[in-house]
Amino acid sequence: MANESRPDTLSSSPRVKSYATAAALVADVDLAAEFGGPVRQLRVGVAGDLKLVFSDGSEDTIYAVQIGEPVPVQATKIRFSGTTAQKITAFP
């Protein structure tokens, strides 16, 4: 079911969500608000960089994330500026 308020978001189940499914992100994604806390893993369907905010408030970029590569993190946000990966799936 597509999320009508966020055209770049696809809800694939109540516990897993995908972002930037058709193009690059156009806004930051507040994972903590959507999942009630940080997510434990991200995976991408189109290789690229992930600019993240972590549960301690720090920010960093994970470069050259490959298709299907699990990224174990405690992330609270995905920043659109600096993120080039697409088809990003978040696991709580």
Image (cartoon, rainbow, N blue to C red):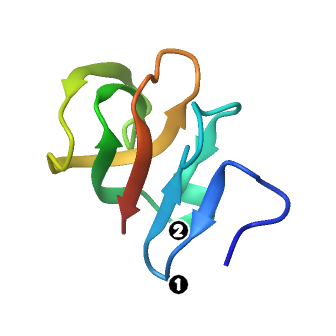
Residue with the most extreme front position: 22
| Residue at x-position 76% and y-position 52% | 7
Which residue is the site of mark 2?
Answer: 35
The image quarter containing residue 20 is top right
What's the CA distance linking mark 2 and mark 1? 9 Å
* Quadrant hosting residue 3: bottom right
Q: Which mark is residue 38?
A: none
Above/below status of 38 relative to 88: below
Structural crowding at the residue carrying mark 2, measured as other residues with C-alpha within 10 Å and reported as few (<14), some (14–19) or many (≥20): some
Tag 2's secondary structure?
A: helix
Q: Residue at x 32, y 25 (%)?
A: 48
Mark 2 or mark 1, earlier in chain: 1
Looking at the image, is mark 2 or mark 1 nearer the viewer? 1
Residue 15 found in image quarter: bottom left
Q: Give the vertical position of 17 relative to 51 (above or below).
A: below
Specify the quadrant that holds the C terminus. Answer: bottom left
